[in-house]
Image (cartoon, grey):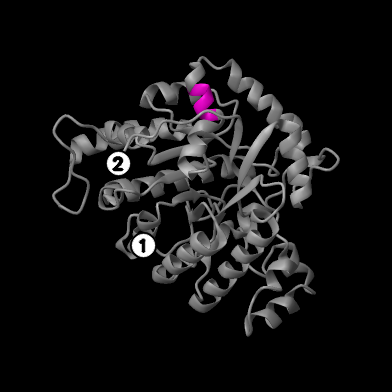
C-alpha cells in the first residue's frame, strides 16, 4: 500500500458526537419494530437511558459525578450539540472546517443481540444521520455508520449501503460488547467489505463494564480506564490475528483513548511477543529483528493504523516520537464533557507541545483528511 502523506488544510475534527434524536430514529424504523419502540417513548425510565433504541451504557455510568468541568455543566449559548445548527456554531467558533460524527447512545451497538432488530435499528440510525447531518447545507459534517455486527454478513451489507448509497466515510467497530474480539474470523465479512470499498473503520469505546473494575465506587477511574482498555484489547486482537495482513487495504482508527495507551501497547506487545512468540501460523509472525512496535509504526506510516487524540495530552509528543509517524489526529469529543472554551484551550496546549510544525499540521487535520479520504 502506498504511504500516506497528510495534506495541507486547516483544523479538522476526527471524532465528534451526535446527541441522537430518538424520536426521529424511531420514525425510520420499520414494523414490527416501530410501534413497540415508539411506545417506549412514553416510559420515563426507558427514555432516560435511551433504551427505546439501543442497549443502555451500563450500570457503571450511573455512578454520581460532580460535573467538575464548567464545560460539562454549562454550555455556551447555541452550542449544546443537540442539532446540526448548534454543531455548526461550535465548529465556526473553534475554527474547525469539518467534523466526522459518531454516536452517543449508539456506542452500545455491539450489545445488540436480536439480528433482525440490529439490522433495522442500524439502518434507521444511518438513514437519520444521512438525512440530518450528511445532507446538511453547511457541508461541514461527515459520519461513521453503525453496523449490525451480531451477524457480520449483515454488517457488511449495511457497510456497503451506508458508503455507496448514503455517502458515509467510515463505520464504527465497538471496542466492547461484541460476542467475540475484533481479531476473530467472524468479522471477516466486514473487513472484506471495508477492504474492497477502501473505507475507514473506527474502533470506539463507550461501555465500560466487564473490564475488571465493575465494583469501583467512583466513576473517574472507570472513565479513565474503560476507553484505553477497550482499545488495547481490540488492537491486540486485530494485530495478533493478522487482520491487517489479511486485508491489505484496511484502515482502522482507535478513538477516544488518548495517545498514552499506544506507548504501553508498543512496549508490552513487543516484549511479550519476543518472550513467547507463537506456534500457530494464523497468529502474527514477524521477521527476525522486527518488533511489534516496528510493525505498529509501519502501519502508522502507511496510514492504516491511526489514533485519535485530544489537544493537551502530556504524552502526545512522546507517542509521536516513539512511533515516528504522524498517526495521531485531533478529536474534539464535542459535546461530551467539552465546550468551545475548553476545546480552544486544548488546541493552545497542542501548539505548545515540542513537536515539529509538520507533526502539528498532521494532528490538526492532515492525518484525519487522509484517513477518512476527505481531501
Q: In the rendered structure, which segment of residues is drawn in magenta?
A: 359-363
Specify few, some or many for label 2: CA neighbours under 10 Å numbering under 14, 14-19, or 20 or more. few
Q: Is residue 7 above or below residue 239?
A: above
Q: Quick one: SS at disc 2?
A: loop
Q: Is residue 348 above or below residue 252?
A: above
Can you tell which of label 1 and label 2 is closer to the viewer?
Answer: 2
Image coordinates of residue 76 in percent, x first then y, are 83, 37
Image coordinates of residue 317 in percent, x first then y, are 48, 21
> Toward which corner of the image does residue 263 lie, by quadrant?
top left
* Quarter the N terminus occupies: top left
Q: Does residue 236 belong to the magenta stretch? A: no
Q: Quick one: SS at disc 1?
A: helix
Q: Earlier in the sequence, mark 1 or mark 2?
A: 2
Q: Is residue 115 above or below residue 99?
A: below
Instruction: State how far apart marks 1 and 2 are (Cα).
Output: 22 Å
Q: Does residue 362 belong to the magenta stretch? A: yes
The answer to which of 126 and 219 lies nearer the viewer is 126
- The residue wearing badge 1 is 187
Q: Residue at x 48, y 32 (%)?
A: 328
Image coordinates of residue 355 in percent, x first then y, are 49, 17
Answer yes or no: do the residues labelled 1 and 2 have beta carbons within 8 Å?
no
Q: Residue at x 44, y 69 (%)?
A: 157
| Residue 364 at least partly seen | yes
- The residue wearing badge 2 is 1
Q: Identify the main secondary structure in magenta.
A: helix
In the picture, measured across the screen, residue 81 lies left or right of residue 280, that is: right
Image coordinates of residue 111 in percent, x first then y, are 52, 65
Amino acid at each position: 500500500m502506498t504511504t500516506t502523506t497528510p495534506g495541507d488544510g486547516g483544523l479538522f475534527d476526527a471524532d465528534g458526537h451526535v446527541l441522537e434524536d430518538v424520536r426521529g430514529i424511531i420514525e425510520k424504523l420499520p414494523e414490527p419494530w416501530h410501534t413497540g419502540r415508539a411506545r417506549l417513548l412514553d416510559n420515563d425510565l426507558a427514555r432516560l437511558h435511551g433504551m427505546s433504541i439501543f442497549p443502555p451504557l451500563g450500570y457503571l455510568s450511573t455512578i454520581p459525578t460532580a460535573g467538575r468541568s464548567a464545560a460539562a455543566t454549562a454550555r455556551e449559548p447555541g452550542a449544546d450539540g443537540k442539532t446540526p445548527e448548534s454543531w455548526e456554531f461550535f465548529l465556526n467558533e473553534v475554527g474547525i472546517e469539518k467534523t466526522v460524527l459518531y454516536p452517543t447512545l449508539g456506542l452500545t451497538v455491539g450489545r445488540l443481540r436480536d439480528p433482525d432488530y440490529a439490522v433495522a435499528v442500524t439502518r434507521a440510525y444511518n438513514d437519520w444521520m444521512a438525512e440530518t447531518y450528511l445532507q446538511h447545507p453547511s457541508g461541514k459534517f461527515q459520519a461513521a455508520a453503525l453496523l449490525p455486527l451480531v451477524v457480520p454478513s449483515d454488517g457488511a451489507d449495511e457497510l456497503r449501503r451506508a458508503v455507496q448509497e448514503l455517502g458515509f466515510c467510515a463505520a464504527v467497530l465497538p471496542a466492547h460488547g461484541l460476542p467475540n474480539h475484533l481479531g476473530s474470523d467472524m468479522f471477516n465479512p466486514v473487513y472484506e467489505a471495508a477492504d474492497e470499498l477502501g473505507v475507514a473503520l473506527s474502533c470506539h469505546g463507550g461501555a465500560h463494564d466487564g473490564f475488571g473494575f465493575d465494583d469501583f465506587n467512583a466513576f473517574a477511574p472507570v472513565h479513565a480506564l474503560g476507553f484505553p482498555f477497550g482499545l488495547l484489547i481490540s488492537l491486540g486482537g486485530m494485530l495478533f490475528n493478522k487482520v491487517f495482513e489479511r486485508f491489505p487495504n484496511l484502515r482502522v482508527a482507535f478513538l477516544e483513548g488518548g495517545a498514552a495507551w499506544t506507548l504501553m501497547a508498543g512496549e508490552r506487545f513487543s516484549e511479550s511477543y519476543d518472550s513467547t512468540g507463537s506456534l500457530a501460523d494464523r497468529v502474527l509472525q514477524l521477521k527476525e529483528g522486527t518488533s511489534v512496535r516496528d510493525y505498529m509504526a509501519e502501519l502508522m506510516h502507511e496510514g492504516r493504523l491511526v489514533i485519535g487524540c485530544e489537544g493537551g495530552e502530556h504524552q502526545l509528543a512522546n507517542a509521536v516520537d516513539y512511533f515516528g509517524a504522524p498517526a495521531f489526529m485531533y478529536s474534539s469529543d464535542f459535546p461530551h464533557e467539552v465546550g468551545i472554551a475548553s476545546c480552544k484551550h486544548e488546541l493552545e496546549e497542542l501548539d505548545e507541545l515540542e513537536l515539529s510544525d509538520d507533526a502539528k499540521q498532521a494532528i490538526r487535520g492532515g492525518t484525519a483528511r487522509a484517513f477518512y479520504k476527505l481531501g
